[in-house]
Image (cartoon, coloured by chain):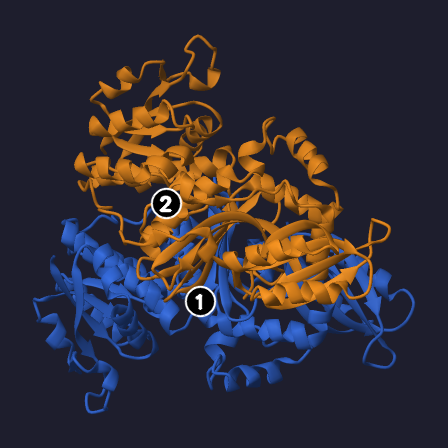
Chain colours: A orange, B blue
Amino acid sequence: MENIKAALLGAGTVGTGVIRVFAENGAIIAARAHAAVTMKTVLVRDVSKPRPELNGFNVTDSIEDILRDDEISIVVELMGGINPAYDYMRRALMAKKHVVTANKDVVAEYGRELVALAEKNGVRFMFEASVGGGIPIILPLKVSLSANRITEIIGIVNGTTNYMLTKMHETRADFASVLKEAQDLGYAEADPTADVDGLDAARKAAILASLAFGTHVSLKDVHVTGIRGIKPLDIEYAKELGYVIKLLAVGRDCREEKGVEVSVHPTFLPKTHPLAAVNGVFNAIFIRGNAVGEAMFYGQGAGSLPTASAVTADIIEVAKGIADGFTVPSGSVYVTDKKICPIDDTVSGYYVRLLVDDKPGVLGAIATAFGNSQVSLKSVMQTKREVPGKAEIVAVTHSVSHKSISTALDKLKSLSVVDEIKNVIRVEDG
Amino acid sequence: MENIKAALLGAGTVGTGVIRVFAENGAIIAARAHAAVTMKTVLVRDVSKPRPELNGFNVTDSIEDILRDDEISIVVELMGGINPAYDYMRRALMAKKHVVTANKDVVAEYGRELVALAEKNGVRFMFEASVGGGIPIILPLKVSLSANRITEIIGIVNGTTNYMLTKMHETRADFASVLKEAQDLGYAEADPTADVDGLDAARKAAILASLAFGTHVSLKDVHVTGIRGIKPLDIEYAKELGYVIKLLAVGRDCREEKGVEVSVHPTFLPKTHPLAAVNGVFNAIFIRGNAVGEAMFYGQGAGSLPTASAVTADIIEVAKGIADGFTVPSGSVYVTDKKICPIDDTVSGYYVRLLVDDKPGVLGAIATAFGNSQVSLKSVMQTKREVPGKAEIVAVTHSVSHKSISTALDKLKSLSVVDEIKNVIRVEDG
C-alpha cells in the first residue's frame, strides 16, 4: 500500500478535528483511500506554544519546510482568512502539491484562479468544507446534479444567525439578548459582525452560486442584509401569517435565465418549505434543478468534527487519485456567460411594516400608494400596538421587482399619514 | 471534443426521461462531460410499436446489436426487474462497456458481483439512481462521507407508502381508502405489494446498508414489515404521543458495532426528527456518522425526470472518465467483516396497543407482565373506545431487545384480561 504524506496548515478547531478523525478512523480512511495517508508536518504560528495534541508530528512555523519537502504531496489549509492562507495555497499548487481547504474567504474570492492554477500544475484544488461544514454540497453540485440546469439554490449557511433566529421564534427575545446568549454559549464571536451582518453567508452564497450557475460570483456581487433589524414584532407577524424568518443565501435565475441574482437577506419563508424546519445551529441547502426538481442537503454547518469530515473526505479523494494513478479528473468547472443582475431587476415578495396615524382612510391611502407603483398586495392588515394614536399596517406583496418596491416605499414615505417604515423583509413563496 | 456513444436498454418512464434531459440540457451535459455524448441505440421489447419519441435513434430488440457495436462504450440499463436486465449488464461489462443502471432489484441482489466484474474488465458500474431517485445519496455515501464510520442510516425511500401515510395523518382515512386514492393518482400500482409490503424499501435498505457498513446485505437479510397493519387509531395515538408514523428503511450498528441490523418497518418517529417533516411522495435519507454527526438528503425519490437526473449524472461521470483518460477510479468498495444481526438482538422502543377487559387492576397486571420480561415502560395509558365492556391500553417502551419484547408479548397473550394484541410498532427515539 502506497504511503502518502500530507501537511496541515493550522492546528486550530478544524485542524485538531482532522487529526482526531485520522486517529479514530484510520483503518477506514486507508481502505477508502487505497493508501496509507499520514500527516507528516503541521504548520503553526508559534512553535514554542506547548501542543500535546501534536506529539508525533513535525511542527514548524515555516511554509518553506512544507513546500520544499518532496515527500509531501497534499497540503491541507485550515488557517482561515485571506492572508497568508491564499499565498501558501498558491505556492503549494505551483510546487505541484494537491491542496485541500476549508477556507471560504479564499475560495469565494480566489477560487476560480486557484482551480485554474491547480489544473495548470496537474494537481487538484478541493474545497468541500468551505460551505456547509460537514454537509456534502460541493461534490453533489459538481457531480450528482451535473445533468441539471440549476434555477435556484437557497441555503441556511450560517449557524450562528440560525440559532439566534430560532431562539427569537421560540422565546420572543430581542436581537441583543439572543446575541448575548449565543456569545455566552460560544456560538457567536465577541465581534459578531461577520455572522449577524451576513458576510459569512455572503461568501458561501458566492461559492454556491459560482458552482451552480457556472459563473464567477465574488463577494462584491452579493447583495447583503443581515439580521440586526429583525424585531420580535416582525417574528410575531411572520408567525401569524404562516411564515418563519430565516437568513437565506440565495442564488437564482433572473432576466429570463440570462443573469443570476445572488443575495443574502432575512426572509419570510412559508412554514411548509423544507428549509423552514431547519433550526438551531443546523444548516441546509435547497436546490431546484430542471431535471431533479427539488433537493435538499441538511447537516451541521460548522464545528470541529463535521468540518473535519468534509476535509478528510477531500484528502481521501486526492489520495485515491494518487494511489490509483489519476491526478486531474475534476477538469474545468462548467462555465457560462451569465451576468450578475442589478438589484433593481431582482424579483421577490415583500413584507412591509409601517407605523401610521390611527385614523379612518389610512389603509386605503396606503393600498393606493402600493397600487400606483404596480405593486400588487397579497394581504394587508392594520393593528393597534405600542404607540398611542398610532396604528401599524403590515402589507405582504406578490412578487415584484426591487425597482417597483423601492418606488412604492418612496411614495409611502411621502404620505403625511405614514410616520415610519418600520421594516421591509423579503418574502419567499411557492 | 470526443464523441462518446451510449445505448439505452428500455424506453419507459426513466428512459424517455433520460432522452428528454439530453435534449433539454445537451450543452450543459457536453460541457460537464468534456465530451459530446450521444444515445446511439435504444433497446425495446417490441420494435413494431410506434414510438415517435425515439425518432432519430437506432431502435432494436436485440442486445447483440449493442454488445457487438464497438462504437458504444456506455450501456444504460433502465428496464427494471432481474431478468433479462442482470444478464444484459453482465454481458455488457464483460464486453468492456461501462454500465449505468437505475435497477434496485439487480443492485440489491448482484451489486457486489457486478462491481467486481466491472473492475475486472477495467470499466465502471454506476447505480446512483437505484436508491432515492434524483436524490444524490450513493456518491455522497461513497465519497463525501468516506471519512466517517457510519453508525446509522435511516431512510424514507418509498414514495407510495409515504404518500399514503401522509394522507392517513391528514385525513384519518384508513389503509384501503388511501390505497385506492394512491392507485387512482398513479402513485400506487394495481398490484401494490412491492410498495405496501415494504419489498421496494427493503431492496433500497440492502443497497444503502451495504455501502454504509461495507458489508454485503441482500434482500433476505432484511427484516421487513409493511404498512397494511396501520390503523387510523394507531395514527391518532401517535399524534397524541408526539410522533408521526413513517415506513423506514433502517441500517444500524448492533452487537457493539460488530454487526449490522437491516430492516424495514413502520415506525413511531418523534415529530422533531428531521425525517418527520418529509411528506407526500418525497424521500429522504438520514445518516449518522462518527465525524459528520447528522446529515440528511432530501428530494424526489422517483419519477421520470428526477430519476433521469441521477442516471444522466452517472453517464456524465463515466463519459468524463473516458474523455479525460481515467477509467477505473472508483476502485474497490470498502469492505468490513460485519455480520447481519439476528432479529432477537436488535434493540428498539415499541408501541403496543392492547384490547383488554374494562375492569380495575388490568393496567397493573399489564405493567407487571412487561416488567417481568425486563421491558421498561416509558408511558402507558388506558382509554375506552369502540368495544363495550372493553378498554384499550397503549404502552410505549424504552429501548429493549426484540427478544425481550417477544417474551413480554407472549406473557400478555396468556393473561386472561387481554383480549387481543391489536398492534406492535417500533418507536424511534433520540
Q: Quadrant of the N terminus of chain B?
A: bottom left
Gap between marks 2 and 1 measured at Cα = 32 Å
Q: Which residue is mark 1?
A: B301
SS for tag 1?
Answer: loop
On screen, residue B14 versus residue A407, left or right, reads left
In the rendering, at what x and y percent does residue A279 appear? 61, 49
Residue found at x 48% / y 35%: A305
Q: Which mark is residue A217?
A: 2
Residue found at x 66% / y 54%: A414
Looking at the rendered structure, whether the residues under marks 2 and 1 are on a common chain is answered as no
On screen, residue B268 versus residue A337, left or right, reads right
For disc 1, the neighbor class at 10 Å (few under 14, some 14 to 19, many from 20) is many
Residue B323 placement: quadrant? bottom left
In the rendering, at what x and y percent does residue A107 appear? 36, 37
Report if residue A150 is visible in the image. yes
- Using the image, name the chain to which the residue with label 2 belongs: A
SS for tag 2?
Answer: loop
Q: Is residue A182 above or below residue A208?
A: above
Q: Is residue A86 above or below residue A379?
A: above
Residue type, numbered disc 2: Val
